[in-house]
Image (cartoon, rainbow, N blue to C red):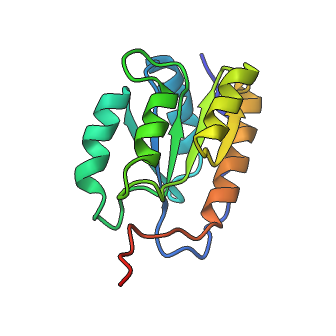
Amino acid sequence: MQVRICRVMPAQAALRPLQALLIDDNPADCLLAQEALDCHIPQVNVKIIQDGIGALAWLRPQHAHPALCDVILLNVNMPGMNGCELLAAIRGDAALRHLPVVMLTTSDRPEDIDRTYDLIVSSYLVKQREFSQFLVQIKDFVRFWTGVRYRQGVQHRA
């Protein structure tokens, strides 16, 4: 029997919950992240997509929607379109490049870290191995990102 230990943080003054998009191909990692993020309901709504191509297919038509997502949690190592390729596609798309992207991955390889920062990642988190430590990591993530103000889509300048 698995015991979940979570402390729900008091409601923030935010008008709406943090909208997070988790992109990770590993179902077990998605489940763990979902459990950790569920400790922060109603502060956080999370949508999970398990591949880069599917994420782009969802993001592109959503870009004009105000609740698109506030922050993307992205894994580095995925088959098909990996996290770096997806990050490059997001940064190369004028309608999506404003979105904050946080790498949430098991990779602590310096070349992965350097590559994602070269592609303008917002931050890089190496997943904690122990679930209790992962809960703390997600709590810190939620605390930070619920306090951030976001750009709501592309602004056309005259």
Estimate the x, y position of residue 43 in percent, counting from the top left: 54, 59
Q: Of residues 83 and 74, which is closer to you in this image? A: 83
Residue 42's place in the image compared with 153, above or below, is above
Estimate the x, y position of residue 68 in percent, counting from the top left: 36, 57
Q: Quadrant of residue 109?
A: top right
Residue at the location (60% across, 36% down)? 103
Q: Of residues 107 and 141, which is closer to you in this image? A: 107
Q: Of residues 155 and 37, which is closer to you in this image? A: 155
Query: Can the viewer see residue 130?
Result: no
Residue at the location (77% across, 31% down)? 133
Residue at the location (63% across, 49% down)? 122
Query: Can the viewer see residue 128?
Result: yes
Quadrant (top left, top right, bottom left, bottom right) of the C terminus: bottom left
Residue at the location (29% across, 32% down)? 54
Residue 55's place in the image compared with 78, above or below, is below
Which residue in the rendered view is the most extreme toward the left?
Answer: 61
Estimate the x, y position of residue 67 in percent, counting from the top left: 36, 63
Quadrant (top left, top right, bottom left, bottom right) of the N terminus: top right
Q: Quadrant of residue 58?
A: top left
Number of callouts? 0
Which residue in the rendered view is the most extreme toward the front?
Answer: 158
Residue 150's place in the image compared with 97, above or below, is below
Q: Of residues 57 and 4, which is closer to you in this image? A: 57
Estimate the x, y position of residue 153 in percent, counting from the top left: 39, 67
| Apparent side of residue 131 relative to residue 78 in the rendered image (left or right) | right
| Apparent side of residue 120 relative to residue 70 in the rendered image (left or right) | right
